[in-house]
Image (cartoon, rainbow, N blue to C red):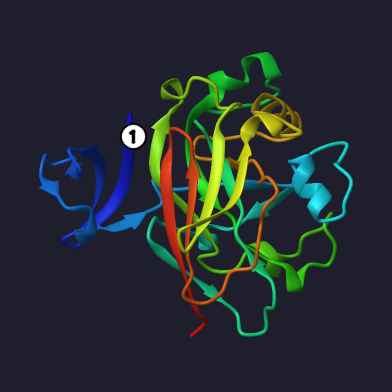
């Protein structure tokens, strides 16, 4: 099942796709262009992976890590489908990152990788923009690189775990102004979903609504004001975002 969270007529609704429109939880059908899209769930603790695809590490001239490189993201960073992300005036290299987002469905502590999927509620798409000018080094991303307001579009759909046969074999693509600029597969992650849940839950408790952003493959390019960026993951849909001037 796919579901979204949207604002319509001043209220927040859960919505599902129906015949090219959205069916609100009230039963009402509305056109997609009449709603404001929110992230499809309310993220709690957000974990993001750096250099979790060997080809991406290589294009940044870094070796693949020996253990997961994880940093946290604040709730201020998330914006919904068709939202806007600001490009700071002093940035010379801002790039998108198409990522599979894994949503935790129940409390997890000391989980073995063989049981990891029992703790997954579902999946969505994340576009975790990076502002490379602010990077101290690739192993210690600082706050200004990954925690700017609205720098991580999320959505459009929350797709239930059981609707995705194999989350470790999904195609990822990014389009900038309609041009394909990034293509990869989740099968090329260095640390897969089971390993990440086992690793994180070995030293801290994961809770319902936590989310793991699993990294991006190679193919990241600079984006500019006015660009429309669409990140796409097989089975999860397309997440659209526009780059605007910082005001």
Where does the image place residue 224, in percent across and percent down from the top left?
56, 74
Callout 1 environment at 10 Å: few (<14), some (14 to 19), or many (20+)? some
Q: Secondary structure at mark 1?
A: strand
Query: Can the viewer see residue 51?
Result: no
- Find residue 140 and report its horizontal and vertical position in percent: 82, 58
Q: Quadrant of residue 167?
A: top right
Choose between 246 and 111: the one closer to the eye: 246
> Residue at point 70% right, 35% down?
204
Position of the N terminus by quadrant = top left
Residue at 55% in and 31% down: 170
Residue pointed to by mark 1: 2
Which residue occupies the extreme front position in the image?
179
The reply, left or right, for residue 242 in relation to residue 145 is: left
Q: Does residue 173 lie above or below 119 as drawn?
A: below
Q: Residue 136 at what x, y percent from top left?
A: 83, 67
Q: Is residue 82 above or below residue 48?
A: below
Of 227 and 131, nearer the camera is 227
Residue 150 is at least partly visible in this image: yes
Residue at the far left in the pictured view: 28
Residue 115 in the image, given as x and y percentages of width and height = 63, 15
Q: Is residue 107 left or right of residue 71?
A: left
**Residue drawn at x 84%, y 36% as measured from the top left:** 67
In depth, the one of 27 and 57 nearer the eye is 57
Say which quarter of the image contains residue 195.
Answer: top right
Who's the residue at 81% across and 56% down the image?
Answer: 60
């Amino acid at each position: 099942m796919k579901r979204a969270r949207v604002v319509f007529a001043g209220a927040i609704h859960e919505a599902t796709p129906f015949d090219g429109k959205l069916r609100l939880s009230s039963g009402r059908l509305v056109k997609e262009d009449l709603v404001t899209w929110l992230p499809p769930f309310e993220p709690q603790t957000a974990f993001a992976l750096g250099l979790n695809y060997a080809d991406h590490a290589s294009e940044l001239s870094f070796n693949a890590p020996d253990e997961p490189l994880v940093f946290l993201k604040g709730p201020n960073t998330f914006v919904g489908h068709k939202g806007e992300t600001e490009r700071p005036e002093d940035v010379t290299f801002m790039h998108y990152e198409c990522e599979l987002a894994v949503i935790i469905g129940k409390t997890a502590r000391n989980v073995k990788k063989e049981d990891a999927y029992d703790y997954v509620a579902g999946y969505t798409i994340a576009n975790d923009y990076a502002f490379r000018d602010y990077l101290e080094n690739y192993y210690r991303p600082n706050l200004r690189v990954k925690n700017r307001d609205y720098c991580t579009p999320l959505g459009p759909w929350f797709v239930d775990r059981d609707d995705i046969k194999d989350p470790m074999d999904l195609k990822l693509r990014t389009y900038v102004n309609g041009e394909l600029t990034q293509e990869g597969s989740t099968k090329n992650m260095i640390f897969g979903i089971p390993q990440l849940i086992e690793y994180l839950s070995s030293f801290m408790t994961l809770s319902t609504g936590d989310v793991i952003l699993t990294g991006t493959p190679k193919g990241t390019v600079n984006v500019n004001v006015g660009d429309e960026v669409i990140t796409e993951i097989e089975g999860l849909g397309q997440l659209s975002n526009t780059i605007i001037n910082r005001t």
